[in-house]
Amino acid sequence: MSNTLRYDASAALPFIEPAAVRGLCASLEAARSETLADVADLKQKQAIPVDKQPLDSGFIELPTELLAGGSGDLLSRMTASAKRLRDQVDILVSLGIGGSYMGLRAIFEAVCHPYHNDLPRGERGGAPRLYFEGDNVDNDAMHGLLQLLSLHCRNPMELAQRWGICVISKSGGTLETAAAFRIFRNALESYYGAGSELARNLVVPITGEVGKLRDVSNSAQYPDVFPIPDGVGGRFSVLTAVGLYPAAVLGVDIRALLQGAADMTERFKTAPIGDNPVMDYVAVCHLLERDKGMKTRILSTWGKRLEAVGLWYDQLLAESLGKHERGAFPLTVVNTRD
């Protein structure tokens, strides 16, 4: 288990009474036990109390399960498919919104070259360019991307002029993504020929086991369709196929990514308060909010490459607690710009 990630709360400690931290230990231990019990209930398909629905804690053990070859060795299948797609296209259009978009964008901007899409293919490590759509109803942006594709891609027989689609939606009924998929799918079929092998092979849906997108995928006979598991909310889905598959297409070492997450999960489960980044962070945030009235939580980064990580974090916090009218107001800033 790696302990390379550290949480340094020293700047906040002058505002927190040591007795308050000690007084919170029992509550923190209880919260950890309850969380792990929820994970066990999901695994065993136990009935979930109404006040806990939807229980979205399935993401916690997912990295460990994937690394162990769970879900029919889904990780190996994703890796093989991602290599196939990477070798066939020079542009990948990712269609998704909310949790089906923000986590992947965070990985892309944090890990890849800041000007990835402007580099020659060789300088991108053979990875395609990546563009995002389906996360809004901005006609200008969508038209601009379609125009870019039509200008860049004129001969579908040449690798440098091929593009593909990764469409991500658990239900398939999300309006923005569904509308974008219809438009880009029509453009793709017009380019490669409707019903052609290329038109089928260069669309990879990531969706739930049932739903509109699953039905479309079955009807179109797309060769690679990857699942979004039950018990994993959209905002927590970055370490499912939602984030892992496109990341693998980009050449990201998704096994190493999962190993880091699995190590942190193990640390959360076993490490004592004071040497547990998850528990320690929760304690500091809770005490500052409860005792000092600090209800704005600012994530400040000195690099633009982490801005998307911050925006994803904003969604995690706001959507998890905001629905219950609890929790701090999240705000990401990039210094010195902001």
Image (cartoon, grey):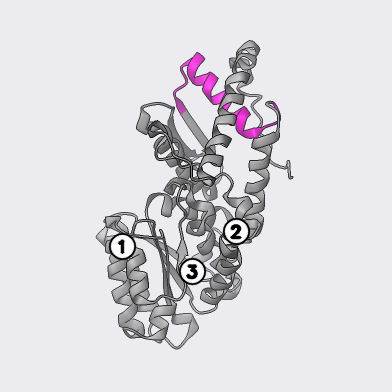
Q: Is residue 67 left or right of residue 149?
A: right
Q: Residues within 10 Å of mark 3 (few under 14, many from 20)?
A: many
From the image, tell me which residue sits under label 2.
70
Q: What's the residue type where badge 1 is placed?
A: Lys
Secondary structure state at the residue bearing disc 3: strand
Q: Is residue 91 left or right of residue 268?
A: left
Residue at mark 1: 212
Q: Is residue 139 magenta?
A: no
Q: Main secondary structure of the magenta part?
A: helix
Q: In terms of depth relative to the viewer, which is nearer, 42 or 92?
A: 42
| Nearer the camera: disc 2 or disc 1 | 2
Q: Amino acid at mark 2?
A: Gly
Classify mark 1: residues with Cα within 10 Å, few (<14), some (14-19) or many (20+): some
Percent of width and height locating residue 140: 27, 61
Mark sitting earlier along the chain (1/3): 3
Can you give x and y, in whole percent of width and height, for residue 329 in the image?
A: 41, 30
Magenta span of residues: 274-296
Is residue 338 at all visible to an observer of this figure?
A: no
Crowd tier of the residue under label 2, counting other residues whose Cα lies within 10 Å: few below 14, some 14–19, many 20 or above: few
Where does residue 206 sit, x and y in percent of width and height? 43, 63
Which label number is shown at residue 129?
3
What's the residue at 29%, 75% (across, down)?
Answer: 186
Asked if the residue under mark 1 is in contact with the one under mark 2, i.e. CB atoms within 8 Å, the reply is: no
Give how far apart the Cα atoms at labels 2 and 1 are. 26 Å
